[in-house]
Amino acid sequence: EDQVTQSPEALRLQEGESSSLNCSYTVSGLRGLFWYRQDPGKGPEFLFTLYSAGEEKEKERLKATLTKKESFLHITAPKPEDSATYLCAPASGGSYIPTFGRGTSLIVHP
Amino acid sequence: DTGVSQDPRHKITKRGQNVTFRCDPISEHNRLYWYRQTLGQGPEFLTYFQNEAQLEKSRLLSDRFSAERPKGSFSTLEIQRTEQGDSAMYLCASSLEAGSEQYFGPGTRLTVT
């Protein structure tokens, strides 16, 4: 059974204080790993897809990386508007159904 | 097209009643997914469609739940004889093809009293 563990569960940062979120996964036959951002009461918003170990993608203050067992979401110089829950979801098998982690709740204080 | 839409956004129902939710995906997307999310958890897969065909259902999906996607366009999710444990956010997502990113709707929040 596919398993996804995200850490930390919650993270508080000061504006400008860079940090990383971790996603550890155990899936058979990884086909891709998705990162999403979710604001309270809203649906998840797509950020990145990573397909193979060593791949990196960037968007504004966010950079996602992938190894064979983990993915990291690096946040550089965060701003209060980056406050949200960040979800990791590896997908496996022919159907590409992602398994979502519980997320990391990020709060960035001004 | 502005994205995935869901209706209603909120539904309060009494235990034992039936409810139906609607999802309109992004128009050119072939795949449509239903998820359920409870507080503090990530979305949990329920079922998905490739065009009008329902290809997979979660083992956790009770037989009180049924979904349709007539003509491969919008989809409905029906819950019969609702229970308090059905209270959750029901999310719909669509994607262009297998493996491509999924775009989520705003969700329908169900409260069963």
Image (cartoon, coloured by chain):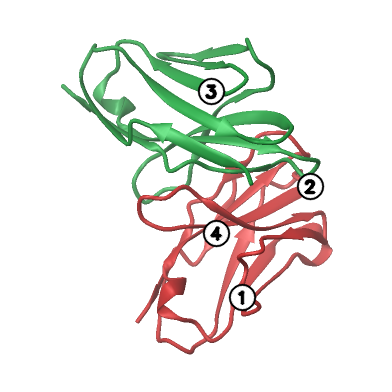
Chain colours: A green, B red
Image coordinates for residue A35, horizontal then vertical, percent? 53, 30
* CB-based contact (under 8 Å), mark 2 and mark 3: no
Q: Which mark is residue B61?
A: none
Mark 2, secondary structure of its residue: loop
Closer to the observer: label 1 or label 3?
3
- The answer to whether residue A21 is above or below residue A89 is above
Mark 1, secondary structure of its residue: strand
Residue type, numbered disc 4: Gln
In the picture, residue B23 is in which quadrant?
bottom right
Q: Are marks 1 and 3 on the same chain?
A: no
Mark 3, secondary structure of its residue: strand
- The answer to whether residue A33 is above or below residue B67 is above
Mark 4, secondary structure of its residue: strand
Q: CA distance from mark 2 to mark 3?
A: 30 Å
Q: CA distance from mark 4 to mark 1?
A: 13 Å
Q: Quadrant of the N terminus of chain B?
A: top right
Q: Which mark is residue B78?
A: 1
Residue type, numbered disc 1: Glu
- The answer to whether residue A58 is above or below residue A93 is above
Q: Are marks 4 and 1 on the same chain?
A: yes
Residue B106 left/right relative to A78 = right
Q: Residue at x 63, y 10 (%)?
A: A54
Report the residue marked by disc 2: B30
Q: Residue at x 50, y 29 (%)?
A: A24
Q: Residue at x 33, y 26 (%)?
A: A82
Q: CA distance from mark 1 to mark 3?
A: 37 Å
Q: Residues within 10 Å of mark 1 (few under 14, many from 20)?
A: some
